[in-house]
Amino acid sequence: MPKRTKTWLSIEQVRQAAEAGDPEAQCYYAICFQTGHHVPVDHREAVKWFRRAAEQGDATAQCYLGYCYQTGQGVDPDPVQAARWFRAAAEQGDPAAQFNLGVCYETGSGVPQSDEEAFKWYLAAAEKGEPQAQFNVGVFYEQGRVVKQDYRQAVKWYRFAAEQECAPAQCNLGLCYELGRGVPQNTDEAVRWFIRAARQGDKTAQHNLGLYYARVEAVPDLDDPRLKELWTEPSKPDSQSPR
């Protein structure tokens, strides 16, 4: 759930504040219906309260409402409406909405396809610390899409995302170290990042790690600390707002 600036002592107080027109309470009340927090799950009721808050300009509610339209949760799917509400929140600086609007532009969902607009919104979200957006900015720089190909910039953004446990970014950062793209070639660093991604279930990282150990020897050294790290139970990252 998003951070609140107000505190209520009970769900009844939340309901009363929402019905009195408080947009923050309306958004929080909607999230309660969406997640089943203190009330039964009711996606249509969630949409009703998200809409009331969104129409008052609450950026978090606008982003959630866009997500509901994007996924058809509590409302008929409508990519145009999804993009509309993502834009409303994105223009207020909401990083999740900026990322989601970037996805809309990259895929042409609800808006004309535009890599330029996609990169613009990914970068806006990335600069606010949104890890998936940071990963996507890295991909654009690595591939030379819209921007001039720049492996150093790709590594910079992959690292930002990787340090926030974004598995695809960890895998790509490992590849950069393996190939010497944007950083000095360093197999140990490559393996370290592959391990972190593999522990999260990234299939490409698991494949690359397997290739590494196959190259080293037919049967890997079970005392290799990097191999032991692979099988150490990872800590689970905090949940994030819906994408």
Image: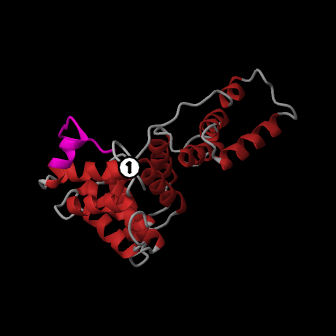
Q: Going 35% across and 54% down the picture, which residue do you hit? A: 96
What is the quadrant of the C terminus in the image? bottom left
- Bounds of the magenta segment: 1-16
**In the foreground, 130 or 13:** 13
Q: Does the magenta stretch include residue 207?
A: no
Q: State whether the magenta stretch is mostly helix, strand or loop.
A: loop
Seen in the image, is 39 located left or right of residue 4?
right
**In the foreground, 140 or 128:** 128
Residue 35 percent location from the top left of the image = 39, 48
Q: Name the residue under label 1.
A: 40
| The furthest residue to the right | 218
Q: Is residue 14 magenta?
A: yes
What is the quadrant of the N terminus in the image? top left
Residue 175 percent location from the top left of the image = 63, 47
Q: Going 63% across and 43% down the picture, which residue do you hit? A: 201
Residue type at mark 1? Answer: Pro
Q: What element carries label 1?
A: loop
Q: Which colour scheme is used?
A: secondary structure
Seen in the image, is 132 located left or right of residue 9?
right
- Is the residue 202 above or below the residue 231 in the image? below
Q: Is residue 59 visible?
A: yes
- Is the residue 100 above or below the residue 8 in the image? below
